[in-house]
Image: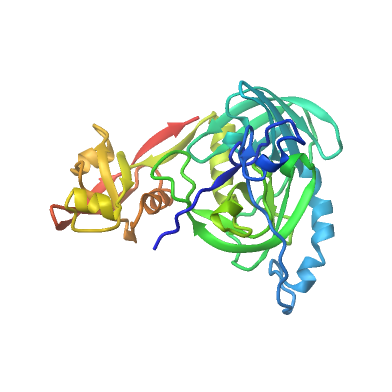
Amino acid sequence: MRPRFGSRRCGDSSGVRLRPRVAALTACVLVAGCGGKDTVVKTITVAQEPAQSGSATAGTFDRIPSVVEQVAPSIVTIFVQADQGQGEGSGVIWDGDGTIVTNNHVVQGASQVEVVFASGSRLPAKVKATDPLYDLAVVTVEGRGLPAATFASSLPKVGSLAIAIGSPLGFENTVTAGIVSGLHRSIPSNGQAPSLVDLLQTDAPISPGNSGGALVDADGRVIGINVAYIPPEARAVSIGFAIPAPTVVDDVGQLVETGKATHAFLGVQPTEVTPEIARQFKLSVTSGALVQEVVPGSAAAKAGLKAGDVIVSLAGKPVRSVEDLLAALRQHEPGDRVSVMVVRDSERMDVEATLAGRSVG
């Protein structure tokens, strides 16, 4: 059974916090981001084992102060002015020339942006490029020689140390620690953008204002950009999520170079197959991604997909939900030829589709 819960972003629903600071404190525990976005972080204890690089052992936790000393200068607080008011989130210095990565929801709709560095210095910033689909954004400041963070090139191991650094609820340069709780996590979104799929899960406490901040490993490498959490009213305890570093590196690399990011695009508008929908449309399956609409001229249209088809597999990966479909597509590039298994009128059929590219930004 798939989990059903409400999530919050760490900026404006993911990581940004609305002001006033004191009056909004209670409400902002559930809302994060620039106007209400949030991320979650929690502290835990770990069984003692022989120390290894990246493993969450007692010895590894002893390294947290030195890791924080190394990475904290690369983490910034982002203040925004938008139509709905003021808010704040977090960010990570991408390079020494003034490029900073954060969540799109932190800066979305911002008319003014200001970056506060760990040193306390402040600089006005501009939003250079955004990717609403992946919930990432690039802002720039007029600065040189900034302390850029190091991003990991691969996924961490489950159980390894995870340190979250950011500005939850306006408490700048806050550090929380836990472990990597899971990989390839998705939050049900029913196909709405941004699709929160293929995420890292952590119990390192993340709160509103952490959005756009760093999730760091025991070697001081950024393993993810904090983006969302499950709030306590959903009976959750320390369940937070971060966009994995390899995804960030690829996406932000495109945003920096071209101002846009291009993703593989199948060309369908999917929706969840629920028991009610299965009964209403007399479907022979109770899970999958139901095709509501096929984009004319798209890869799906050329492959012969039709509204009413239920996608149950893509490139050999089972598709039980819309999130499974979106996560599977993220493993491919425009031009890739993939097999798509669909159920149509109680019959299963395989089709081949050549994925197109969709640019966002």
- 289 with respect to 347 (left or right): right
Q: How many labels does the image show?
A: 0
Residue closer to the observer: 47 or 70: 47
Residue 277 percent across, percent down from the top left: 25, 49
Q: Which of 168 and 123 is in front in this view?
A: 168
Q: Coloured how? A: rainbow
Instruction: Answer yes or no: is residue 230 visible.
Output: no
x, y percentage for residue 50?
73, 79
The spot of residue 301 in percent (x, y) is: 22, 38
Along the line of sight, which residue is nearer the eye, 188 or 267?
188
Residue drawn at x 62%, y 30% is: 107
Q: Residue at x 71, y 77 (%)?
A: 47
Q: Which residue is drawn at 31% across and 43% down?
A: 270
User: In the depicted view, which residue is nearer to us: 184 or 35?
Assistant: 35
Where, by quadrant of the figure, is residue 37 drawn? top right
285 left or right of 72 in image: left
Q: Can residue 105 be seen in this view?
A: yes
Give the vertical position of 272 relative to 284 (above or below): above
Q: Where is residue 225 in the image (x, y as percent from the top left)?
A: 63, 47
Q: In which quarter of the image is the N terminus?
A: bottom left
In this rendering, the answer to whether 177 lies above or below 23 is below
Q: Which residue is drawn at 64% across and 33% down?
A: 34
